[in-house]
Amino acid sequence: MEAVMSVDDSGQGHAIRTGGQGTRVSGPRVLVAGASIAGPALAHWLRRRGAEVTVVERAPELRPGGQAVDARGVAREAIERMGLAAAVRAACTDTAGAHTVDADGQVLETFRADDDGGDGFIADIEILRGDLSRVLYEDTRDGVEYVFDDRIADLVQDADGVDVVFAGGDRRRFDLVVGADGPHSELRAMVFGPHERFLRHLGHVLAFYSVPNEFGLDRWLLEYQDRESGRSALLRPIRDATRAMAMFYFASADFDVDHRDVAAQKVLLRERMAGLGWLTPDILAHLDDTPDFYLDQVAQVVMDRWSSGRWVCSGTRRSARRRCPDRAPGWPWSVPTCWPGSWPLPGGTPTRGSPATRRGCARSSRPTRRSAD
């Protein structure tokens, strides 16, 4: 039995599986691990091409918060092709622009959202990670099976499929398994080896969390940078005017805090932000009350290959930085959303996009091979 792709005149792909006599059966069964951005985005395209998609997420529900995601170039085109432009714009931060300030709050520079045709420092389409996740989930929930509060505990593949054991006890079989669970992917560790082999620390740490908007933010982002220490603090408005999103950034030669040890992460943040001026003490005062704290290293996943048989690892915003012809140089993008028509099912072919662009994205999305330092 094999999976094939047919394409109609509108460019839509339809996935079918055929038996030994060519009899049509149900679409390919695909398991996607991770329900943040890449997972639901991929589920959207797989579903449109006829696949039966299950998304498993270890969190009990969608995780809120996070940094703003700018929709530029190919990402904007992908959103439009997905039919989600209106939903994304409705959930945007509606940020008018950004001010960089000194320790006393005096404005040093101003950047408007309409600078450079909406593609400047602040993008015309800017949405918080958690809100984009919600839009993608609402778009796919009726046609995709979502399993929350569970994870893949074991998987074994053979020539015809992958047998998966879930931590909750279920055992199921799929034709393809995709890891879209971020730079700390449990699936990648299960299939390829421990994170230490592939996760390259890039010398920086970021933290995000929401705080009460007691700072008078009104559609304008504020950023303070201490150039001597290389640290920065940022406050940005969000759609809920009673709240704001805080961000801290600092350089770090190494990073050895477990990505799930929130208490240790908060201790680290307080230590590294000690003495930073501007509104930093007031922002840190809400650290223990926030419902959506997130801290992690800026990292790159460096691998010789992204797949092994019927298992494939999807790139995410923080797991790899690659260049695409239609993106500004160096901007990261996610494999499922960069060029929607160039994501084939097993046995399938790309369906949309110019050949030159598809070739460019394919070349640029190849994993980076680097020797150990």
Image (cartoon, rainbow, N blue to C red):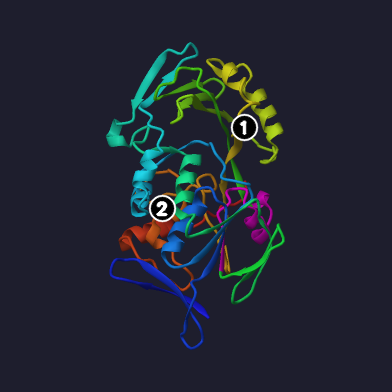
Q: Find out whether residue 65 is within the magenta segment.
A: no
Q: Residue visible at 44% across and 20% down?
A: 217
Mark before the other along the chain sequence, 1 or 2: 1
Q: Amino acid type of disc 2?
A: Cys
Asked if residue 247 shows in the view, the reply is yes
Local secondary structure at mark 1: loop
Q: Which residue is mark 2?
A: 338
Picture coordinates of residue 53 (x, y %)? 52, 63
Q: Position of residue 160 (x, y in %)?
A: 59, 76
Toward the viewer: 120 or 198?
120
Q: Secondary structure at mark 2?
A: helix
Looking at the picture, tell me which residue is in the foreground, 27 or 78. Answer: 27
User: Circles 1 and 2: CB distance less than 8 Å?
Assistant: no
Q: Is residue 151 left or right of residue 102?
A: right
Is 346 in front, or is 272?
A: 346
Residue labelled with disc 1 = 252
- In depth, the one of 282 and 105 nearer the eye is 282
Q: Residue furthest bottom?
A: 21
Determine the image quadrant of residue 249: top right
Q: Which percent across, then down, holds residue 274?
A: 64, 19
Tell me if mark 2 has few (under 14), some (14-19) or many (20+) residues whose alpha carbon lies within 10 angstroms of its own.
many
Question: Residue 87 bears which disc, if any?
Answer: none
Q: Amino acid at mark 1?
A: Ser
Q: Position of residue 364 (x, y in %)?
A: 43, 55
Gap in angstroms between the C-alphas marked 1 and 2: 30 Å
Determine whether 74 is above or below 304 in the image: above
Crowdedness near tag 1: few (<14), some (14–19) or many (≥20) residues, C-alpha within 10 Å: some
Write the start and end of the magenta stretch as one range: 176-197
Horizontally, is 284 left or right of 66 in the view? right
Q: Nearer the viewer, mark 1 or mark 2?
A: 2
The residue under the point 52% across, 24% down is: 232
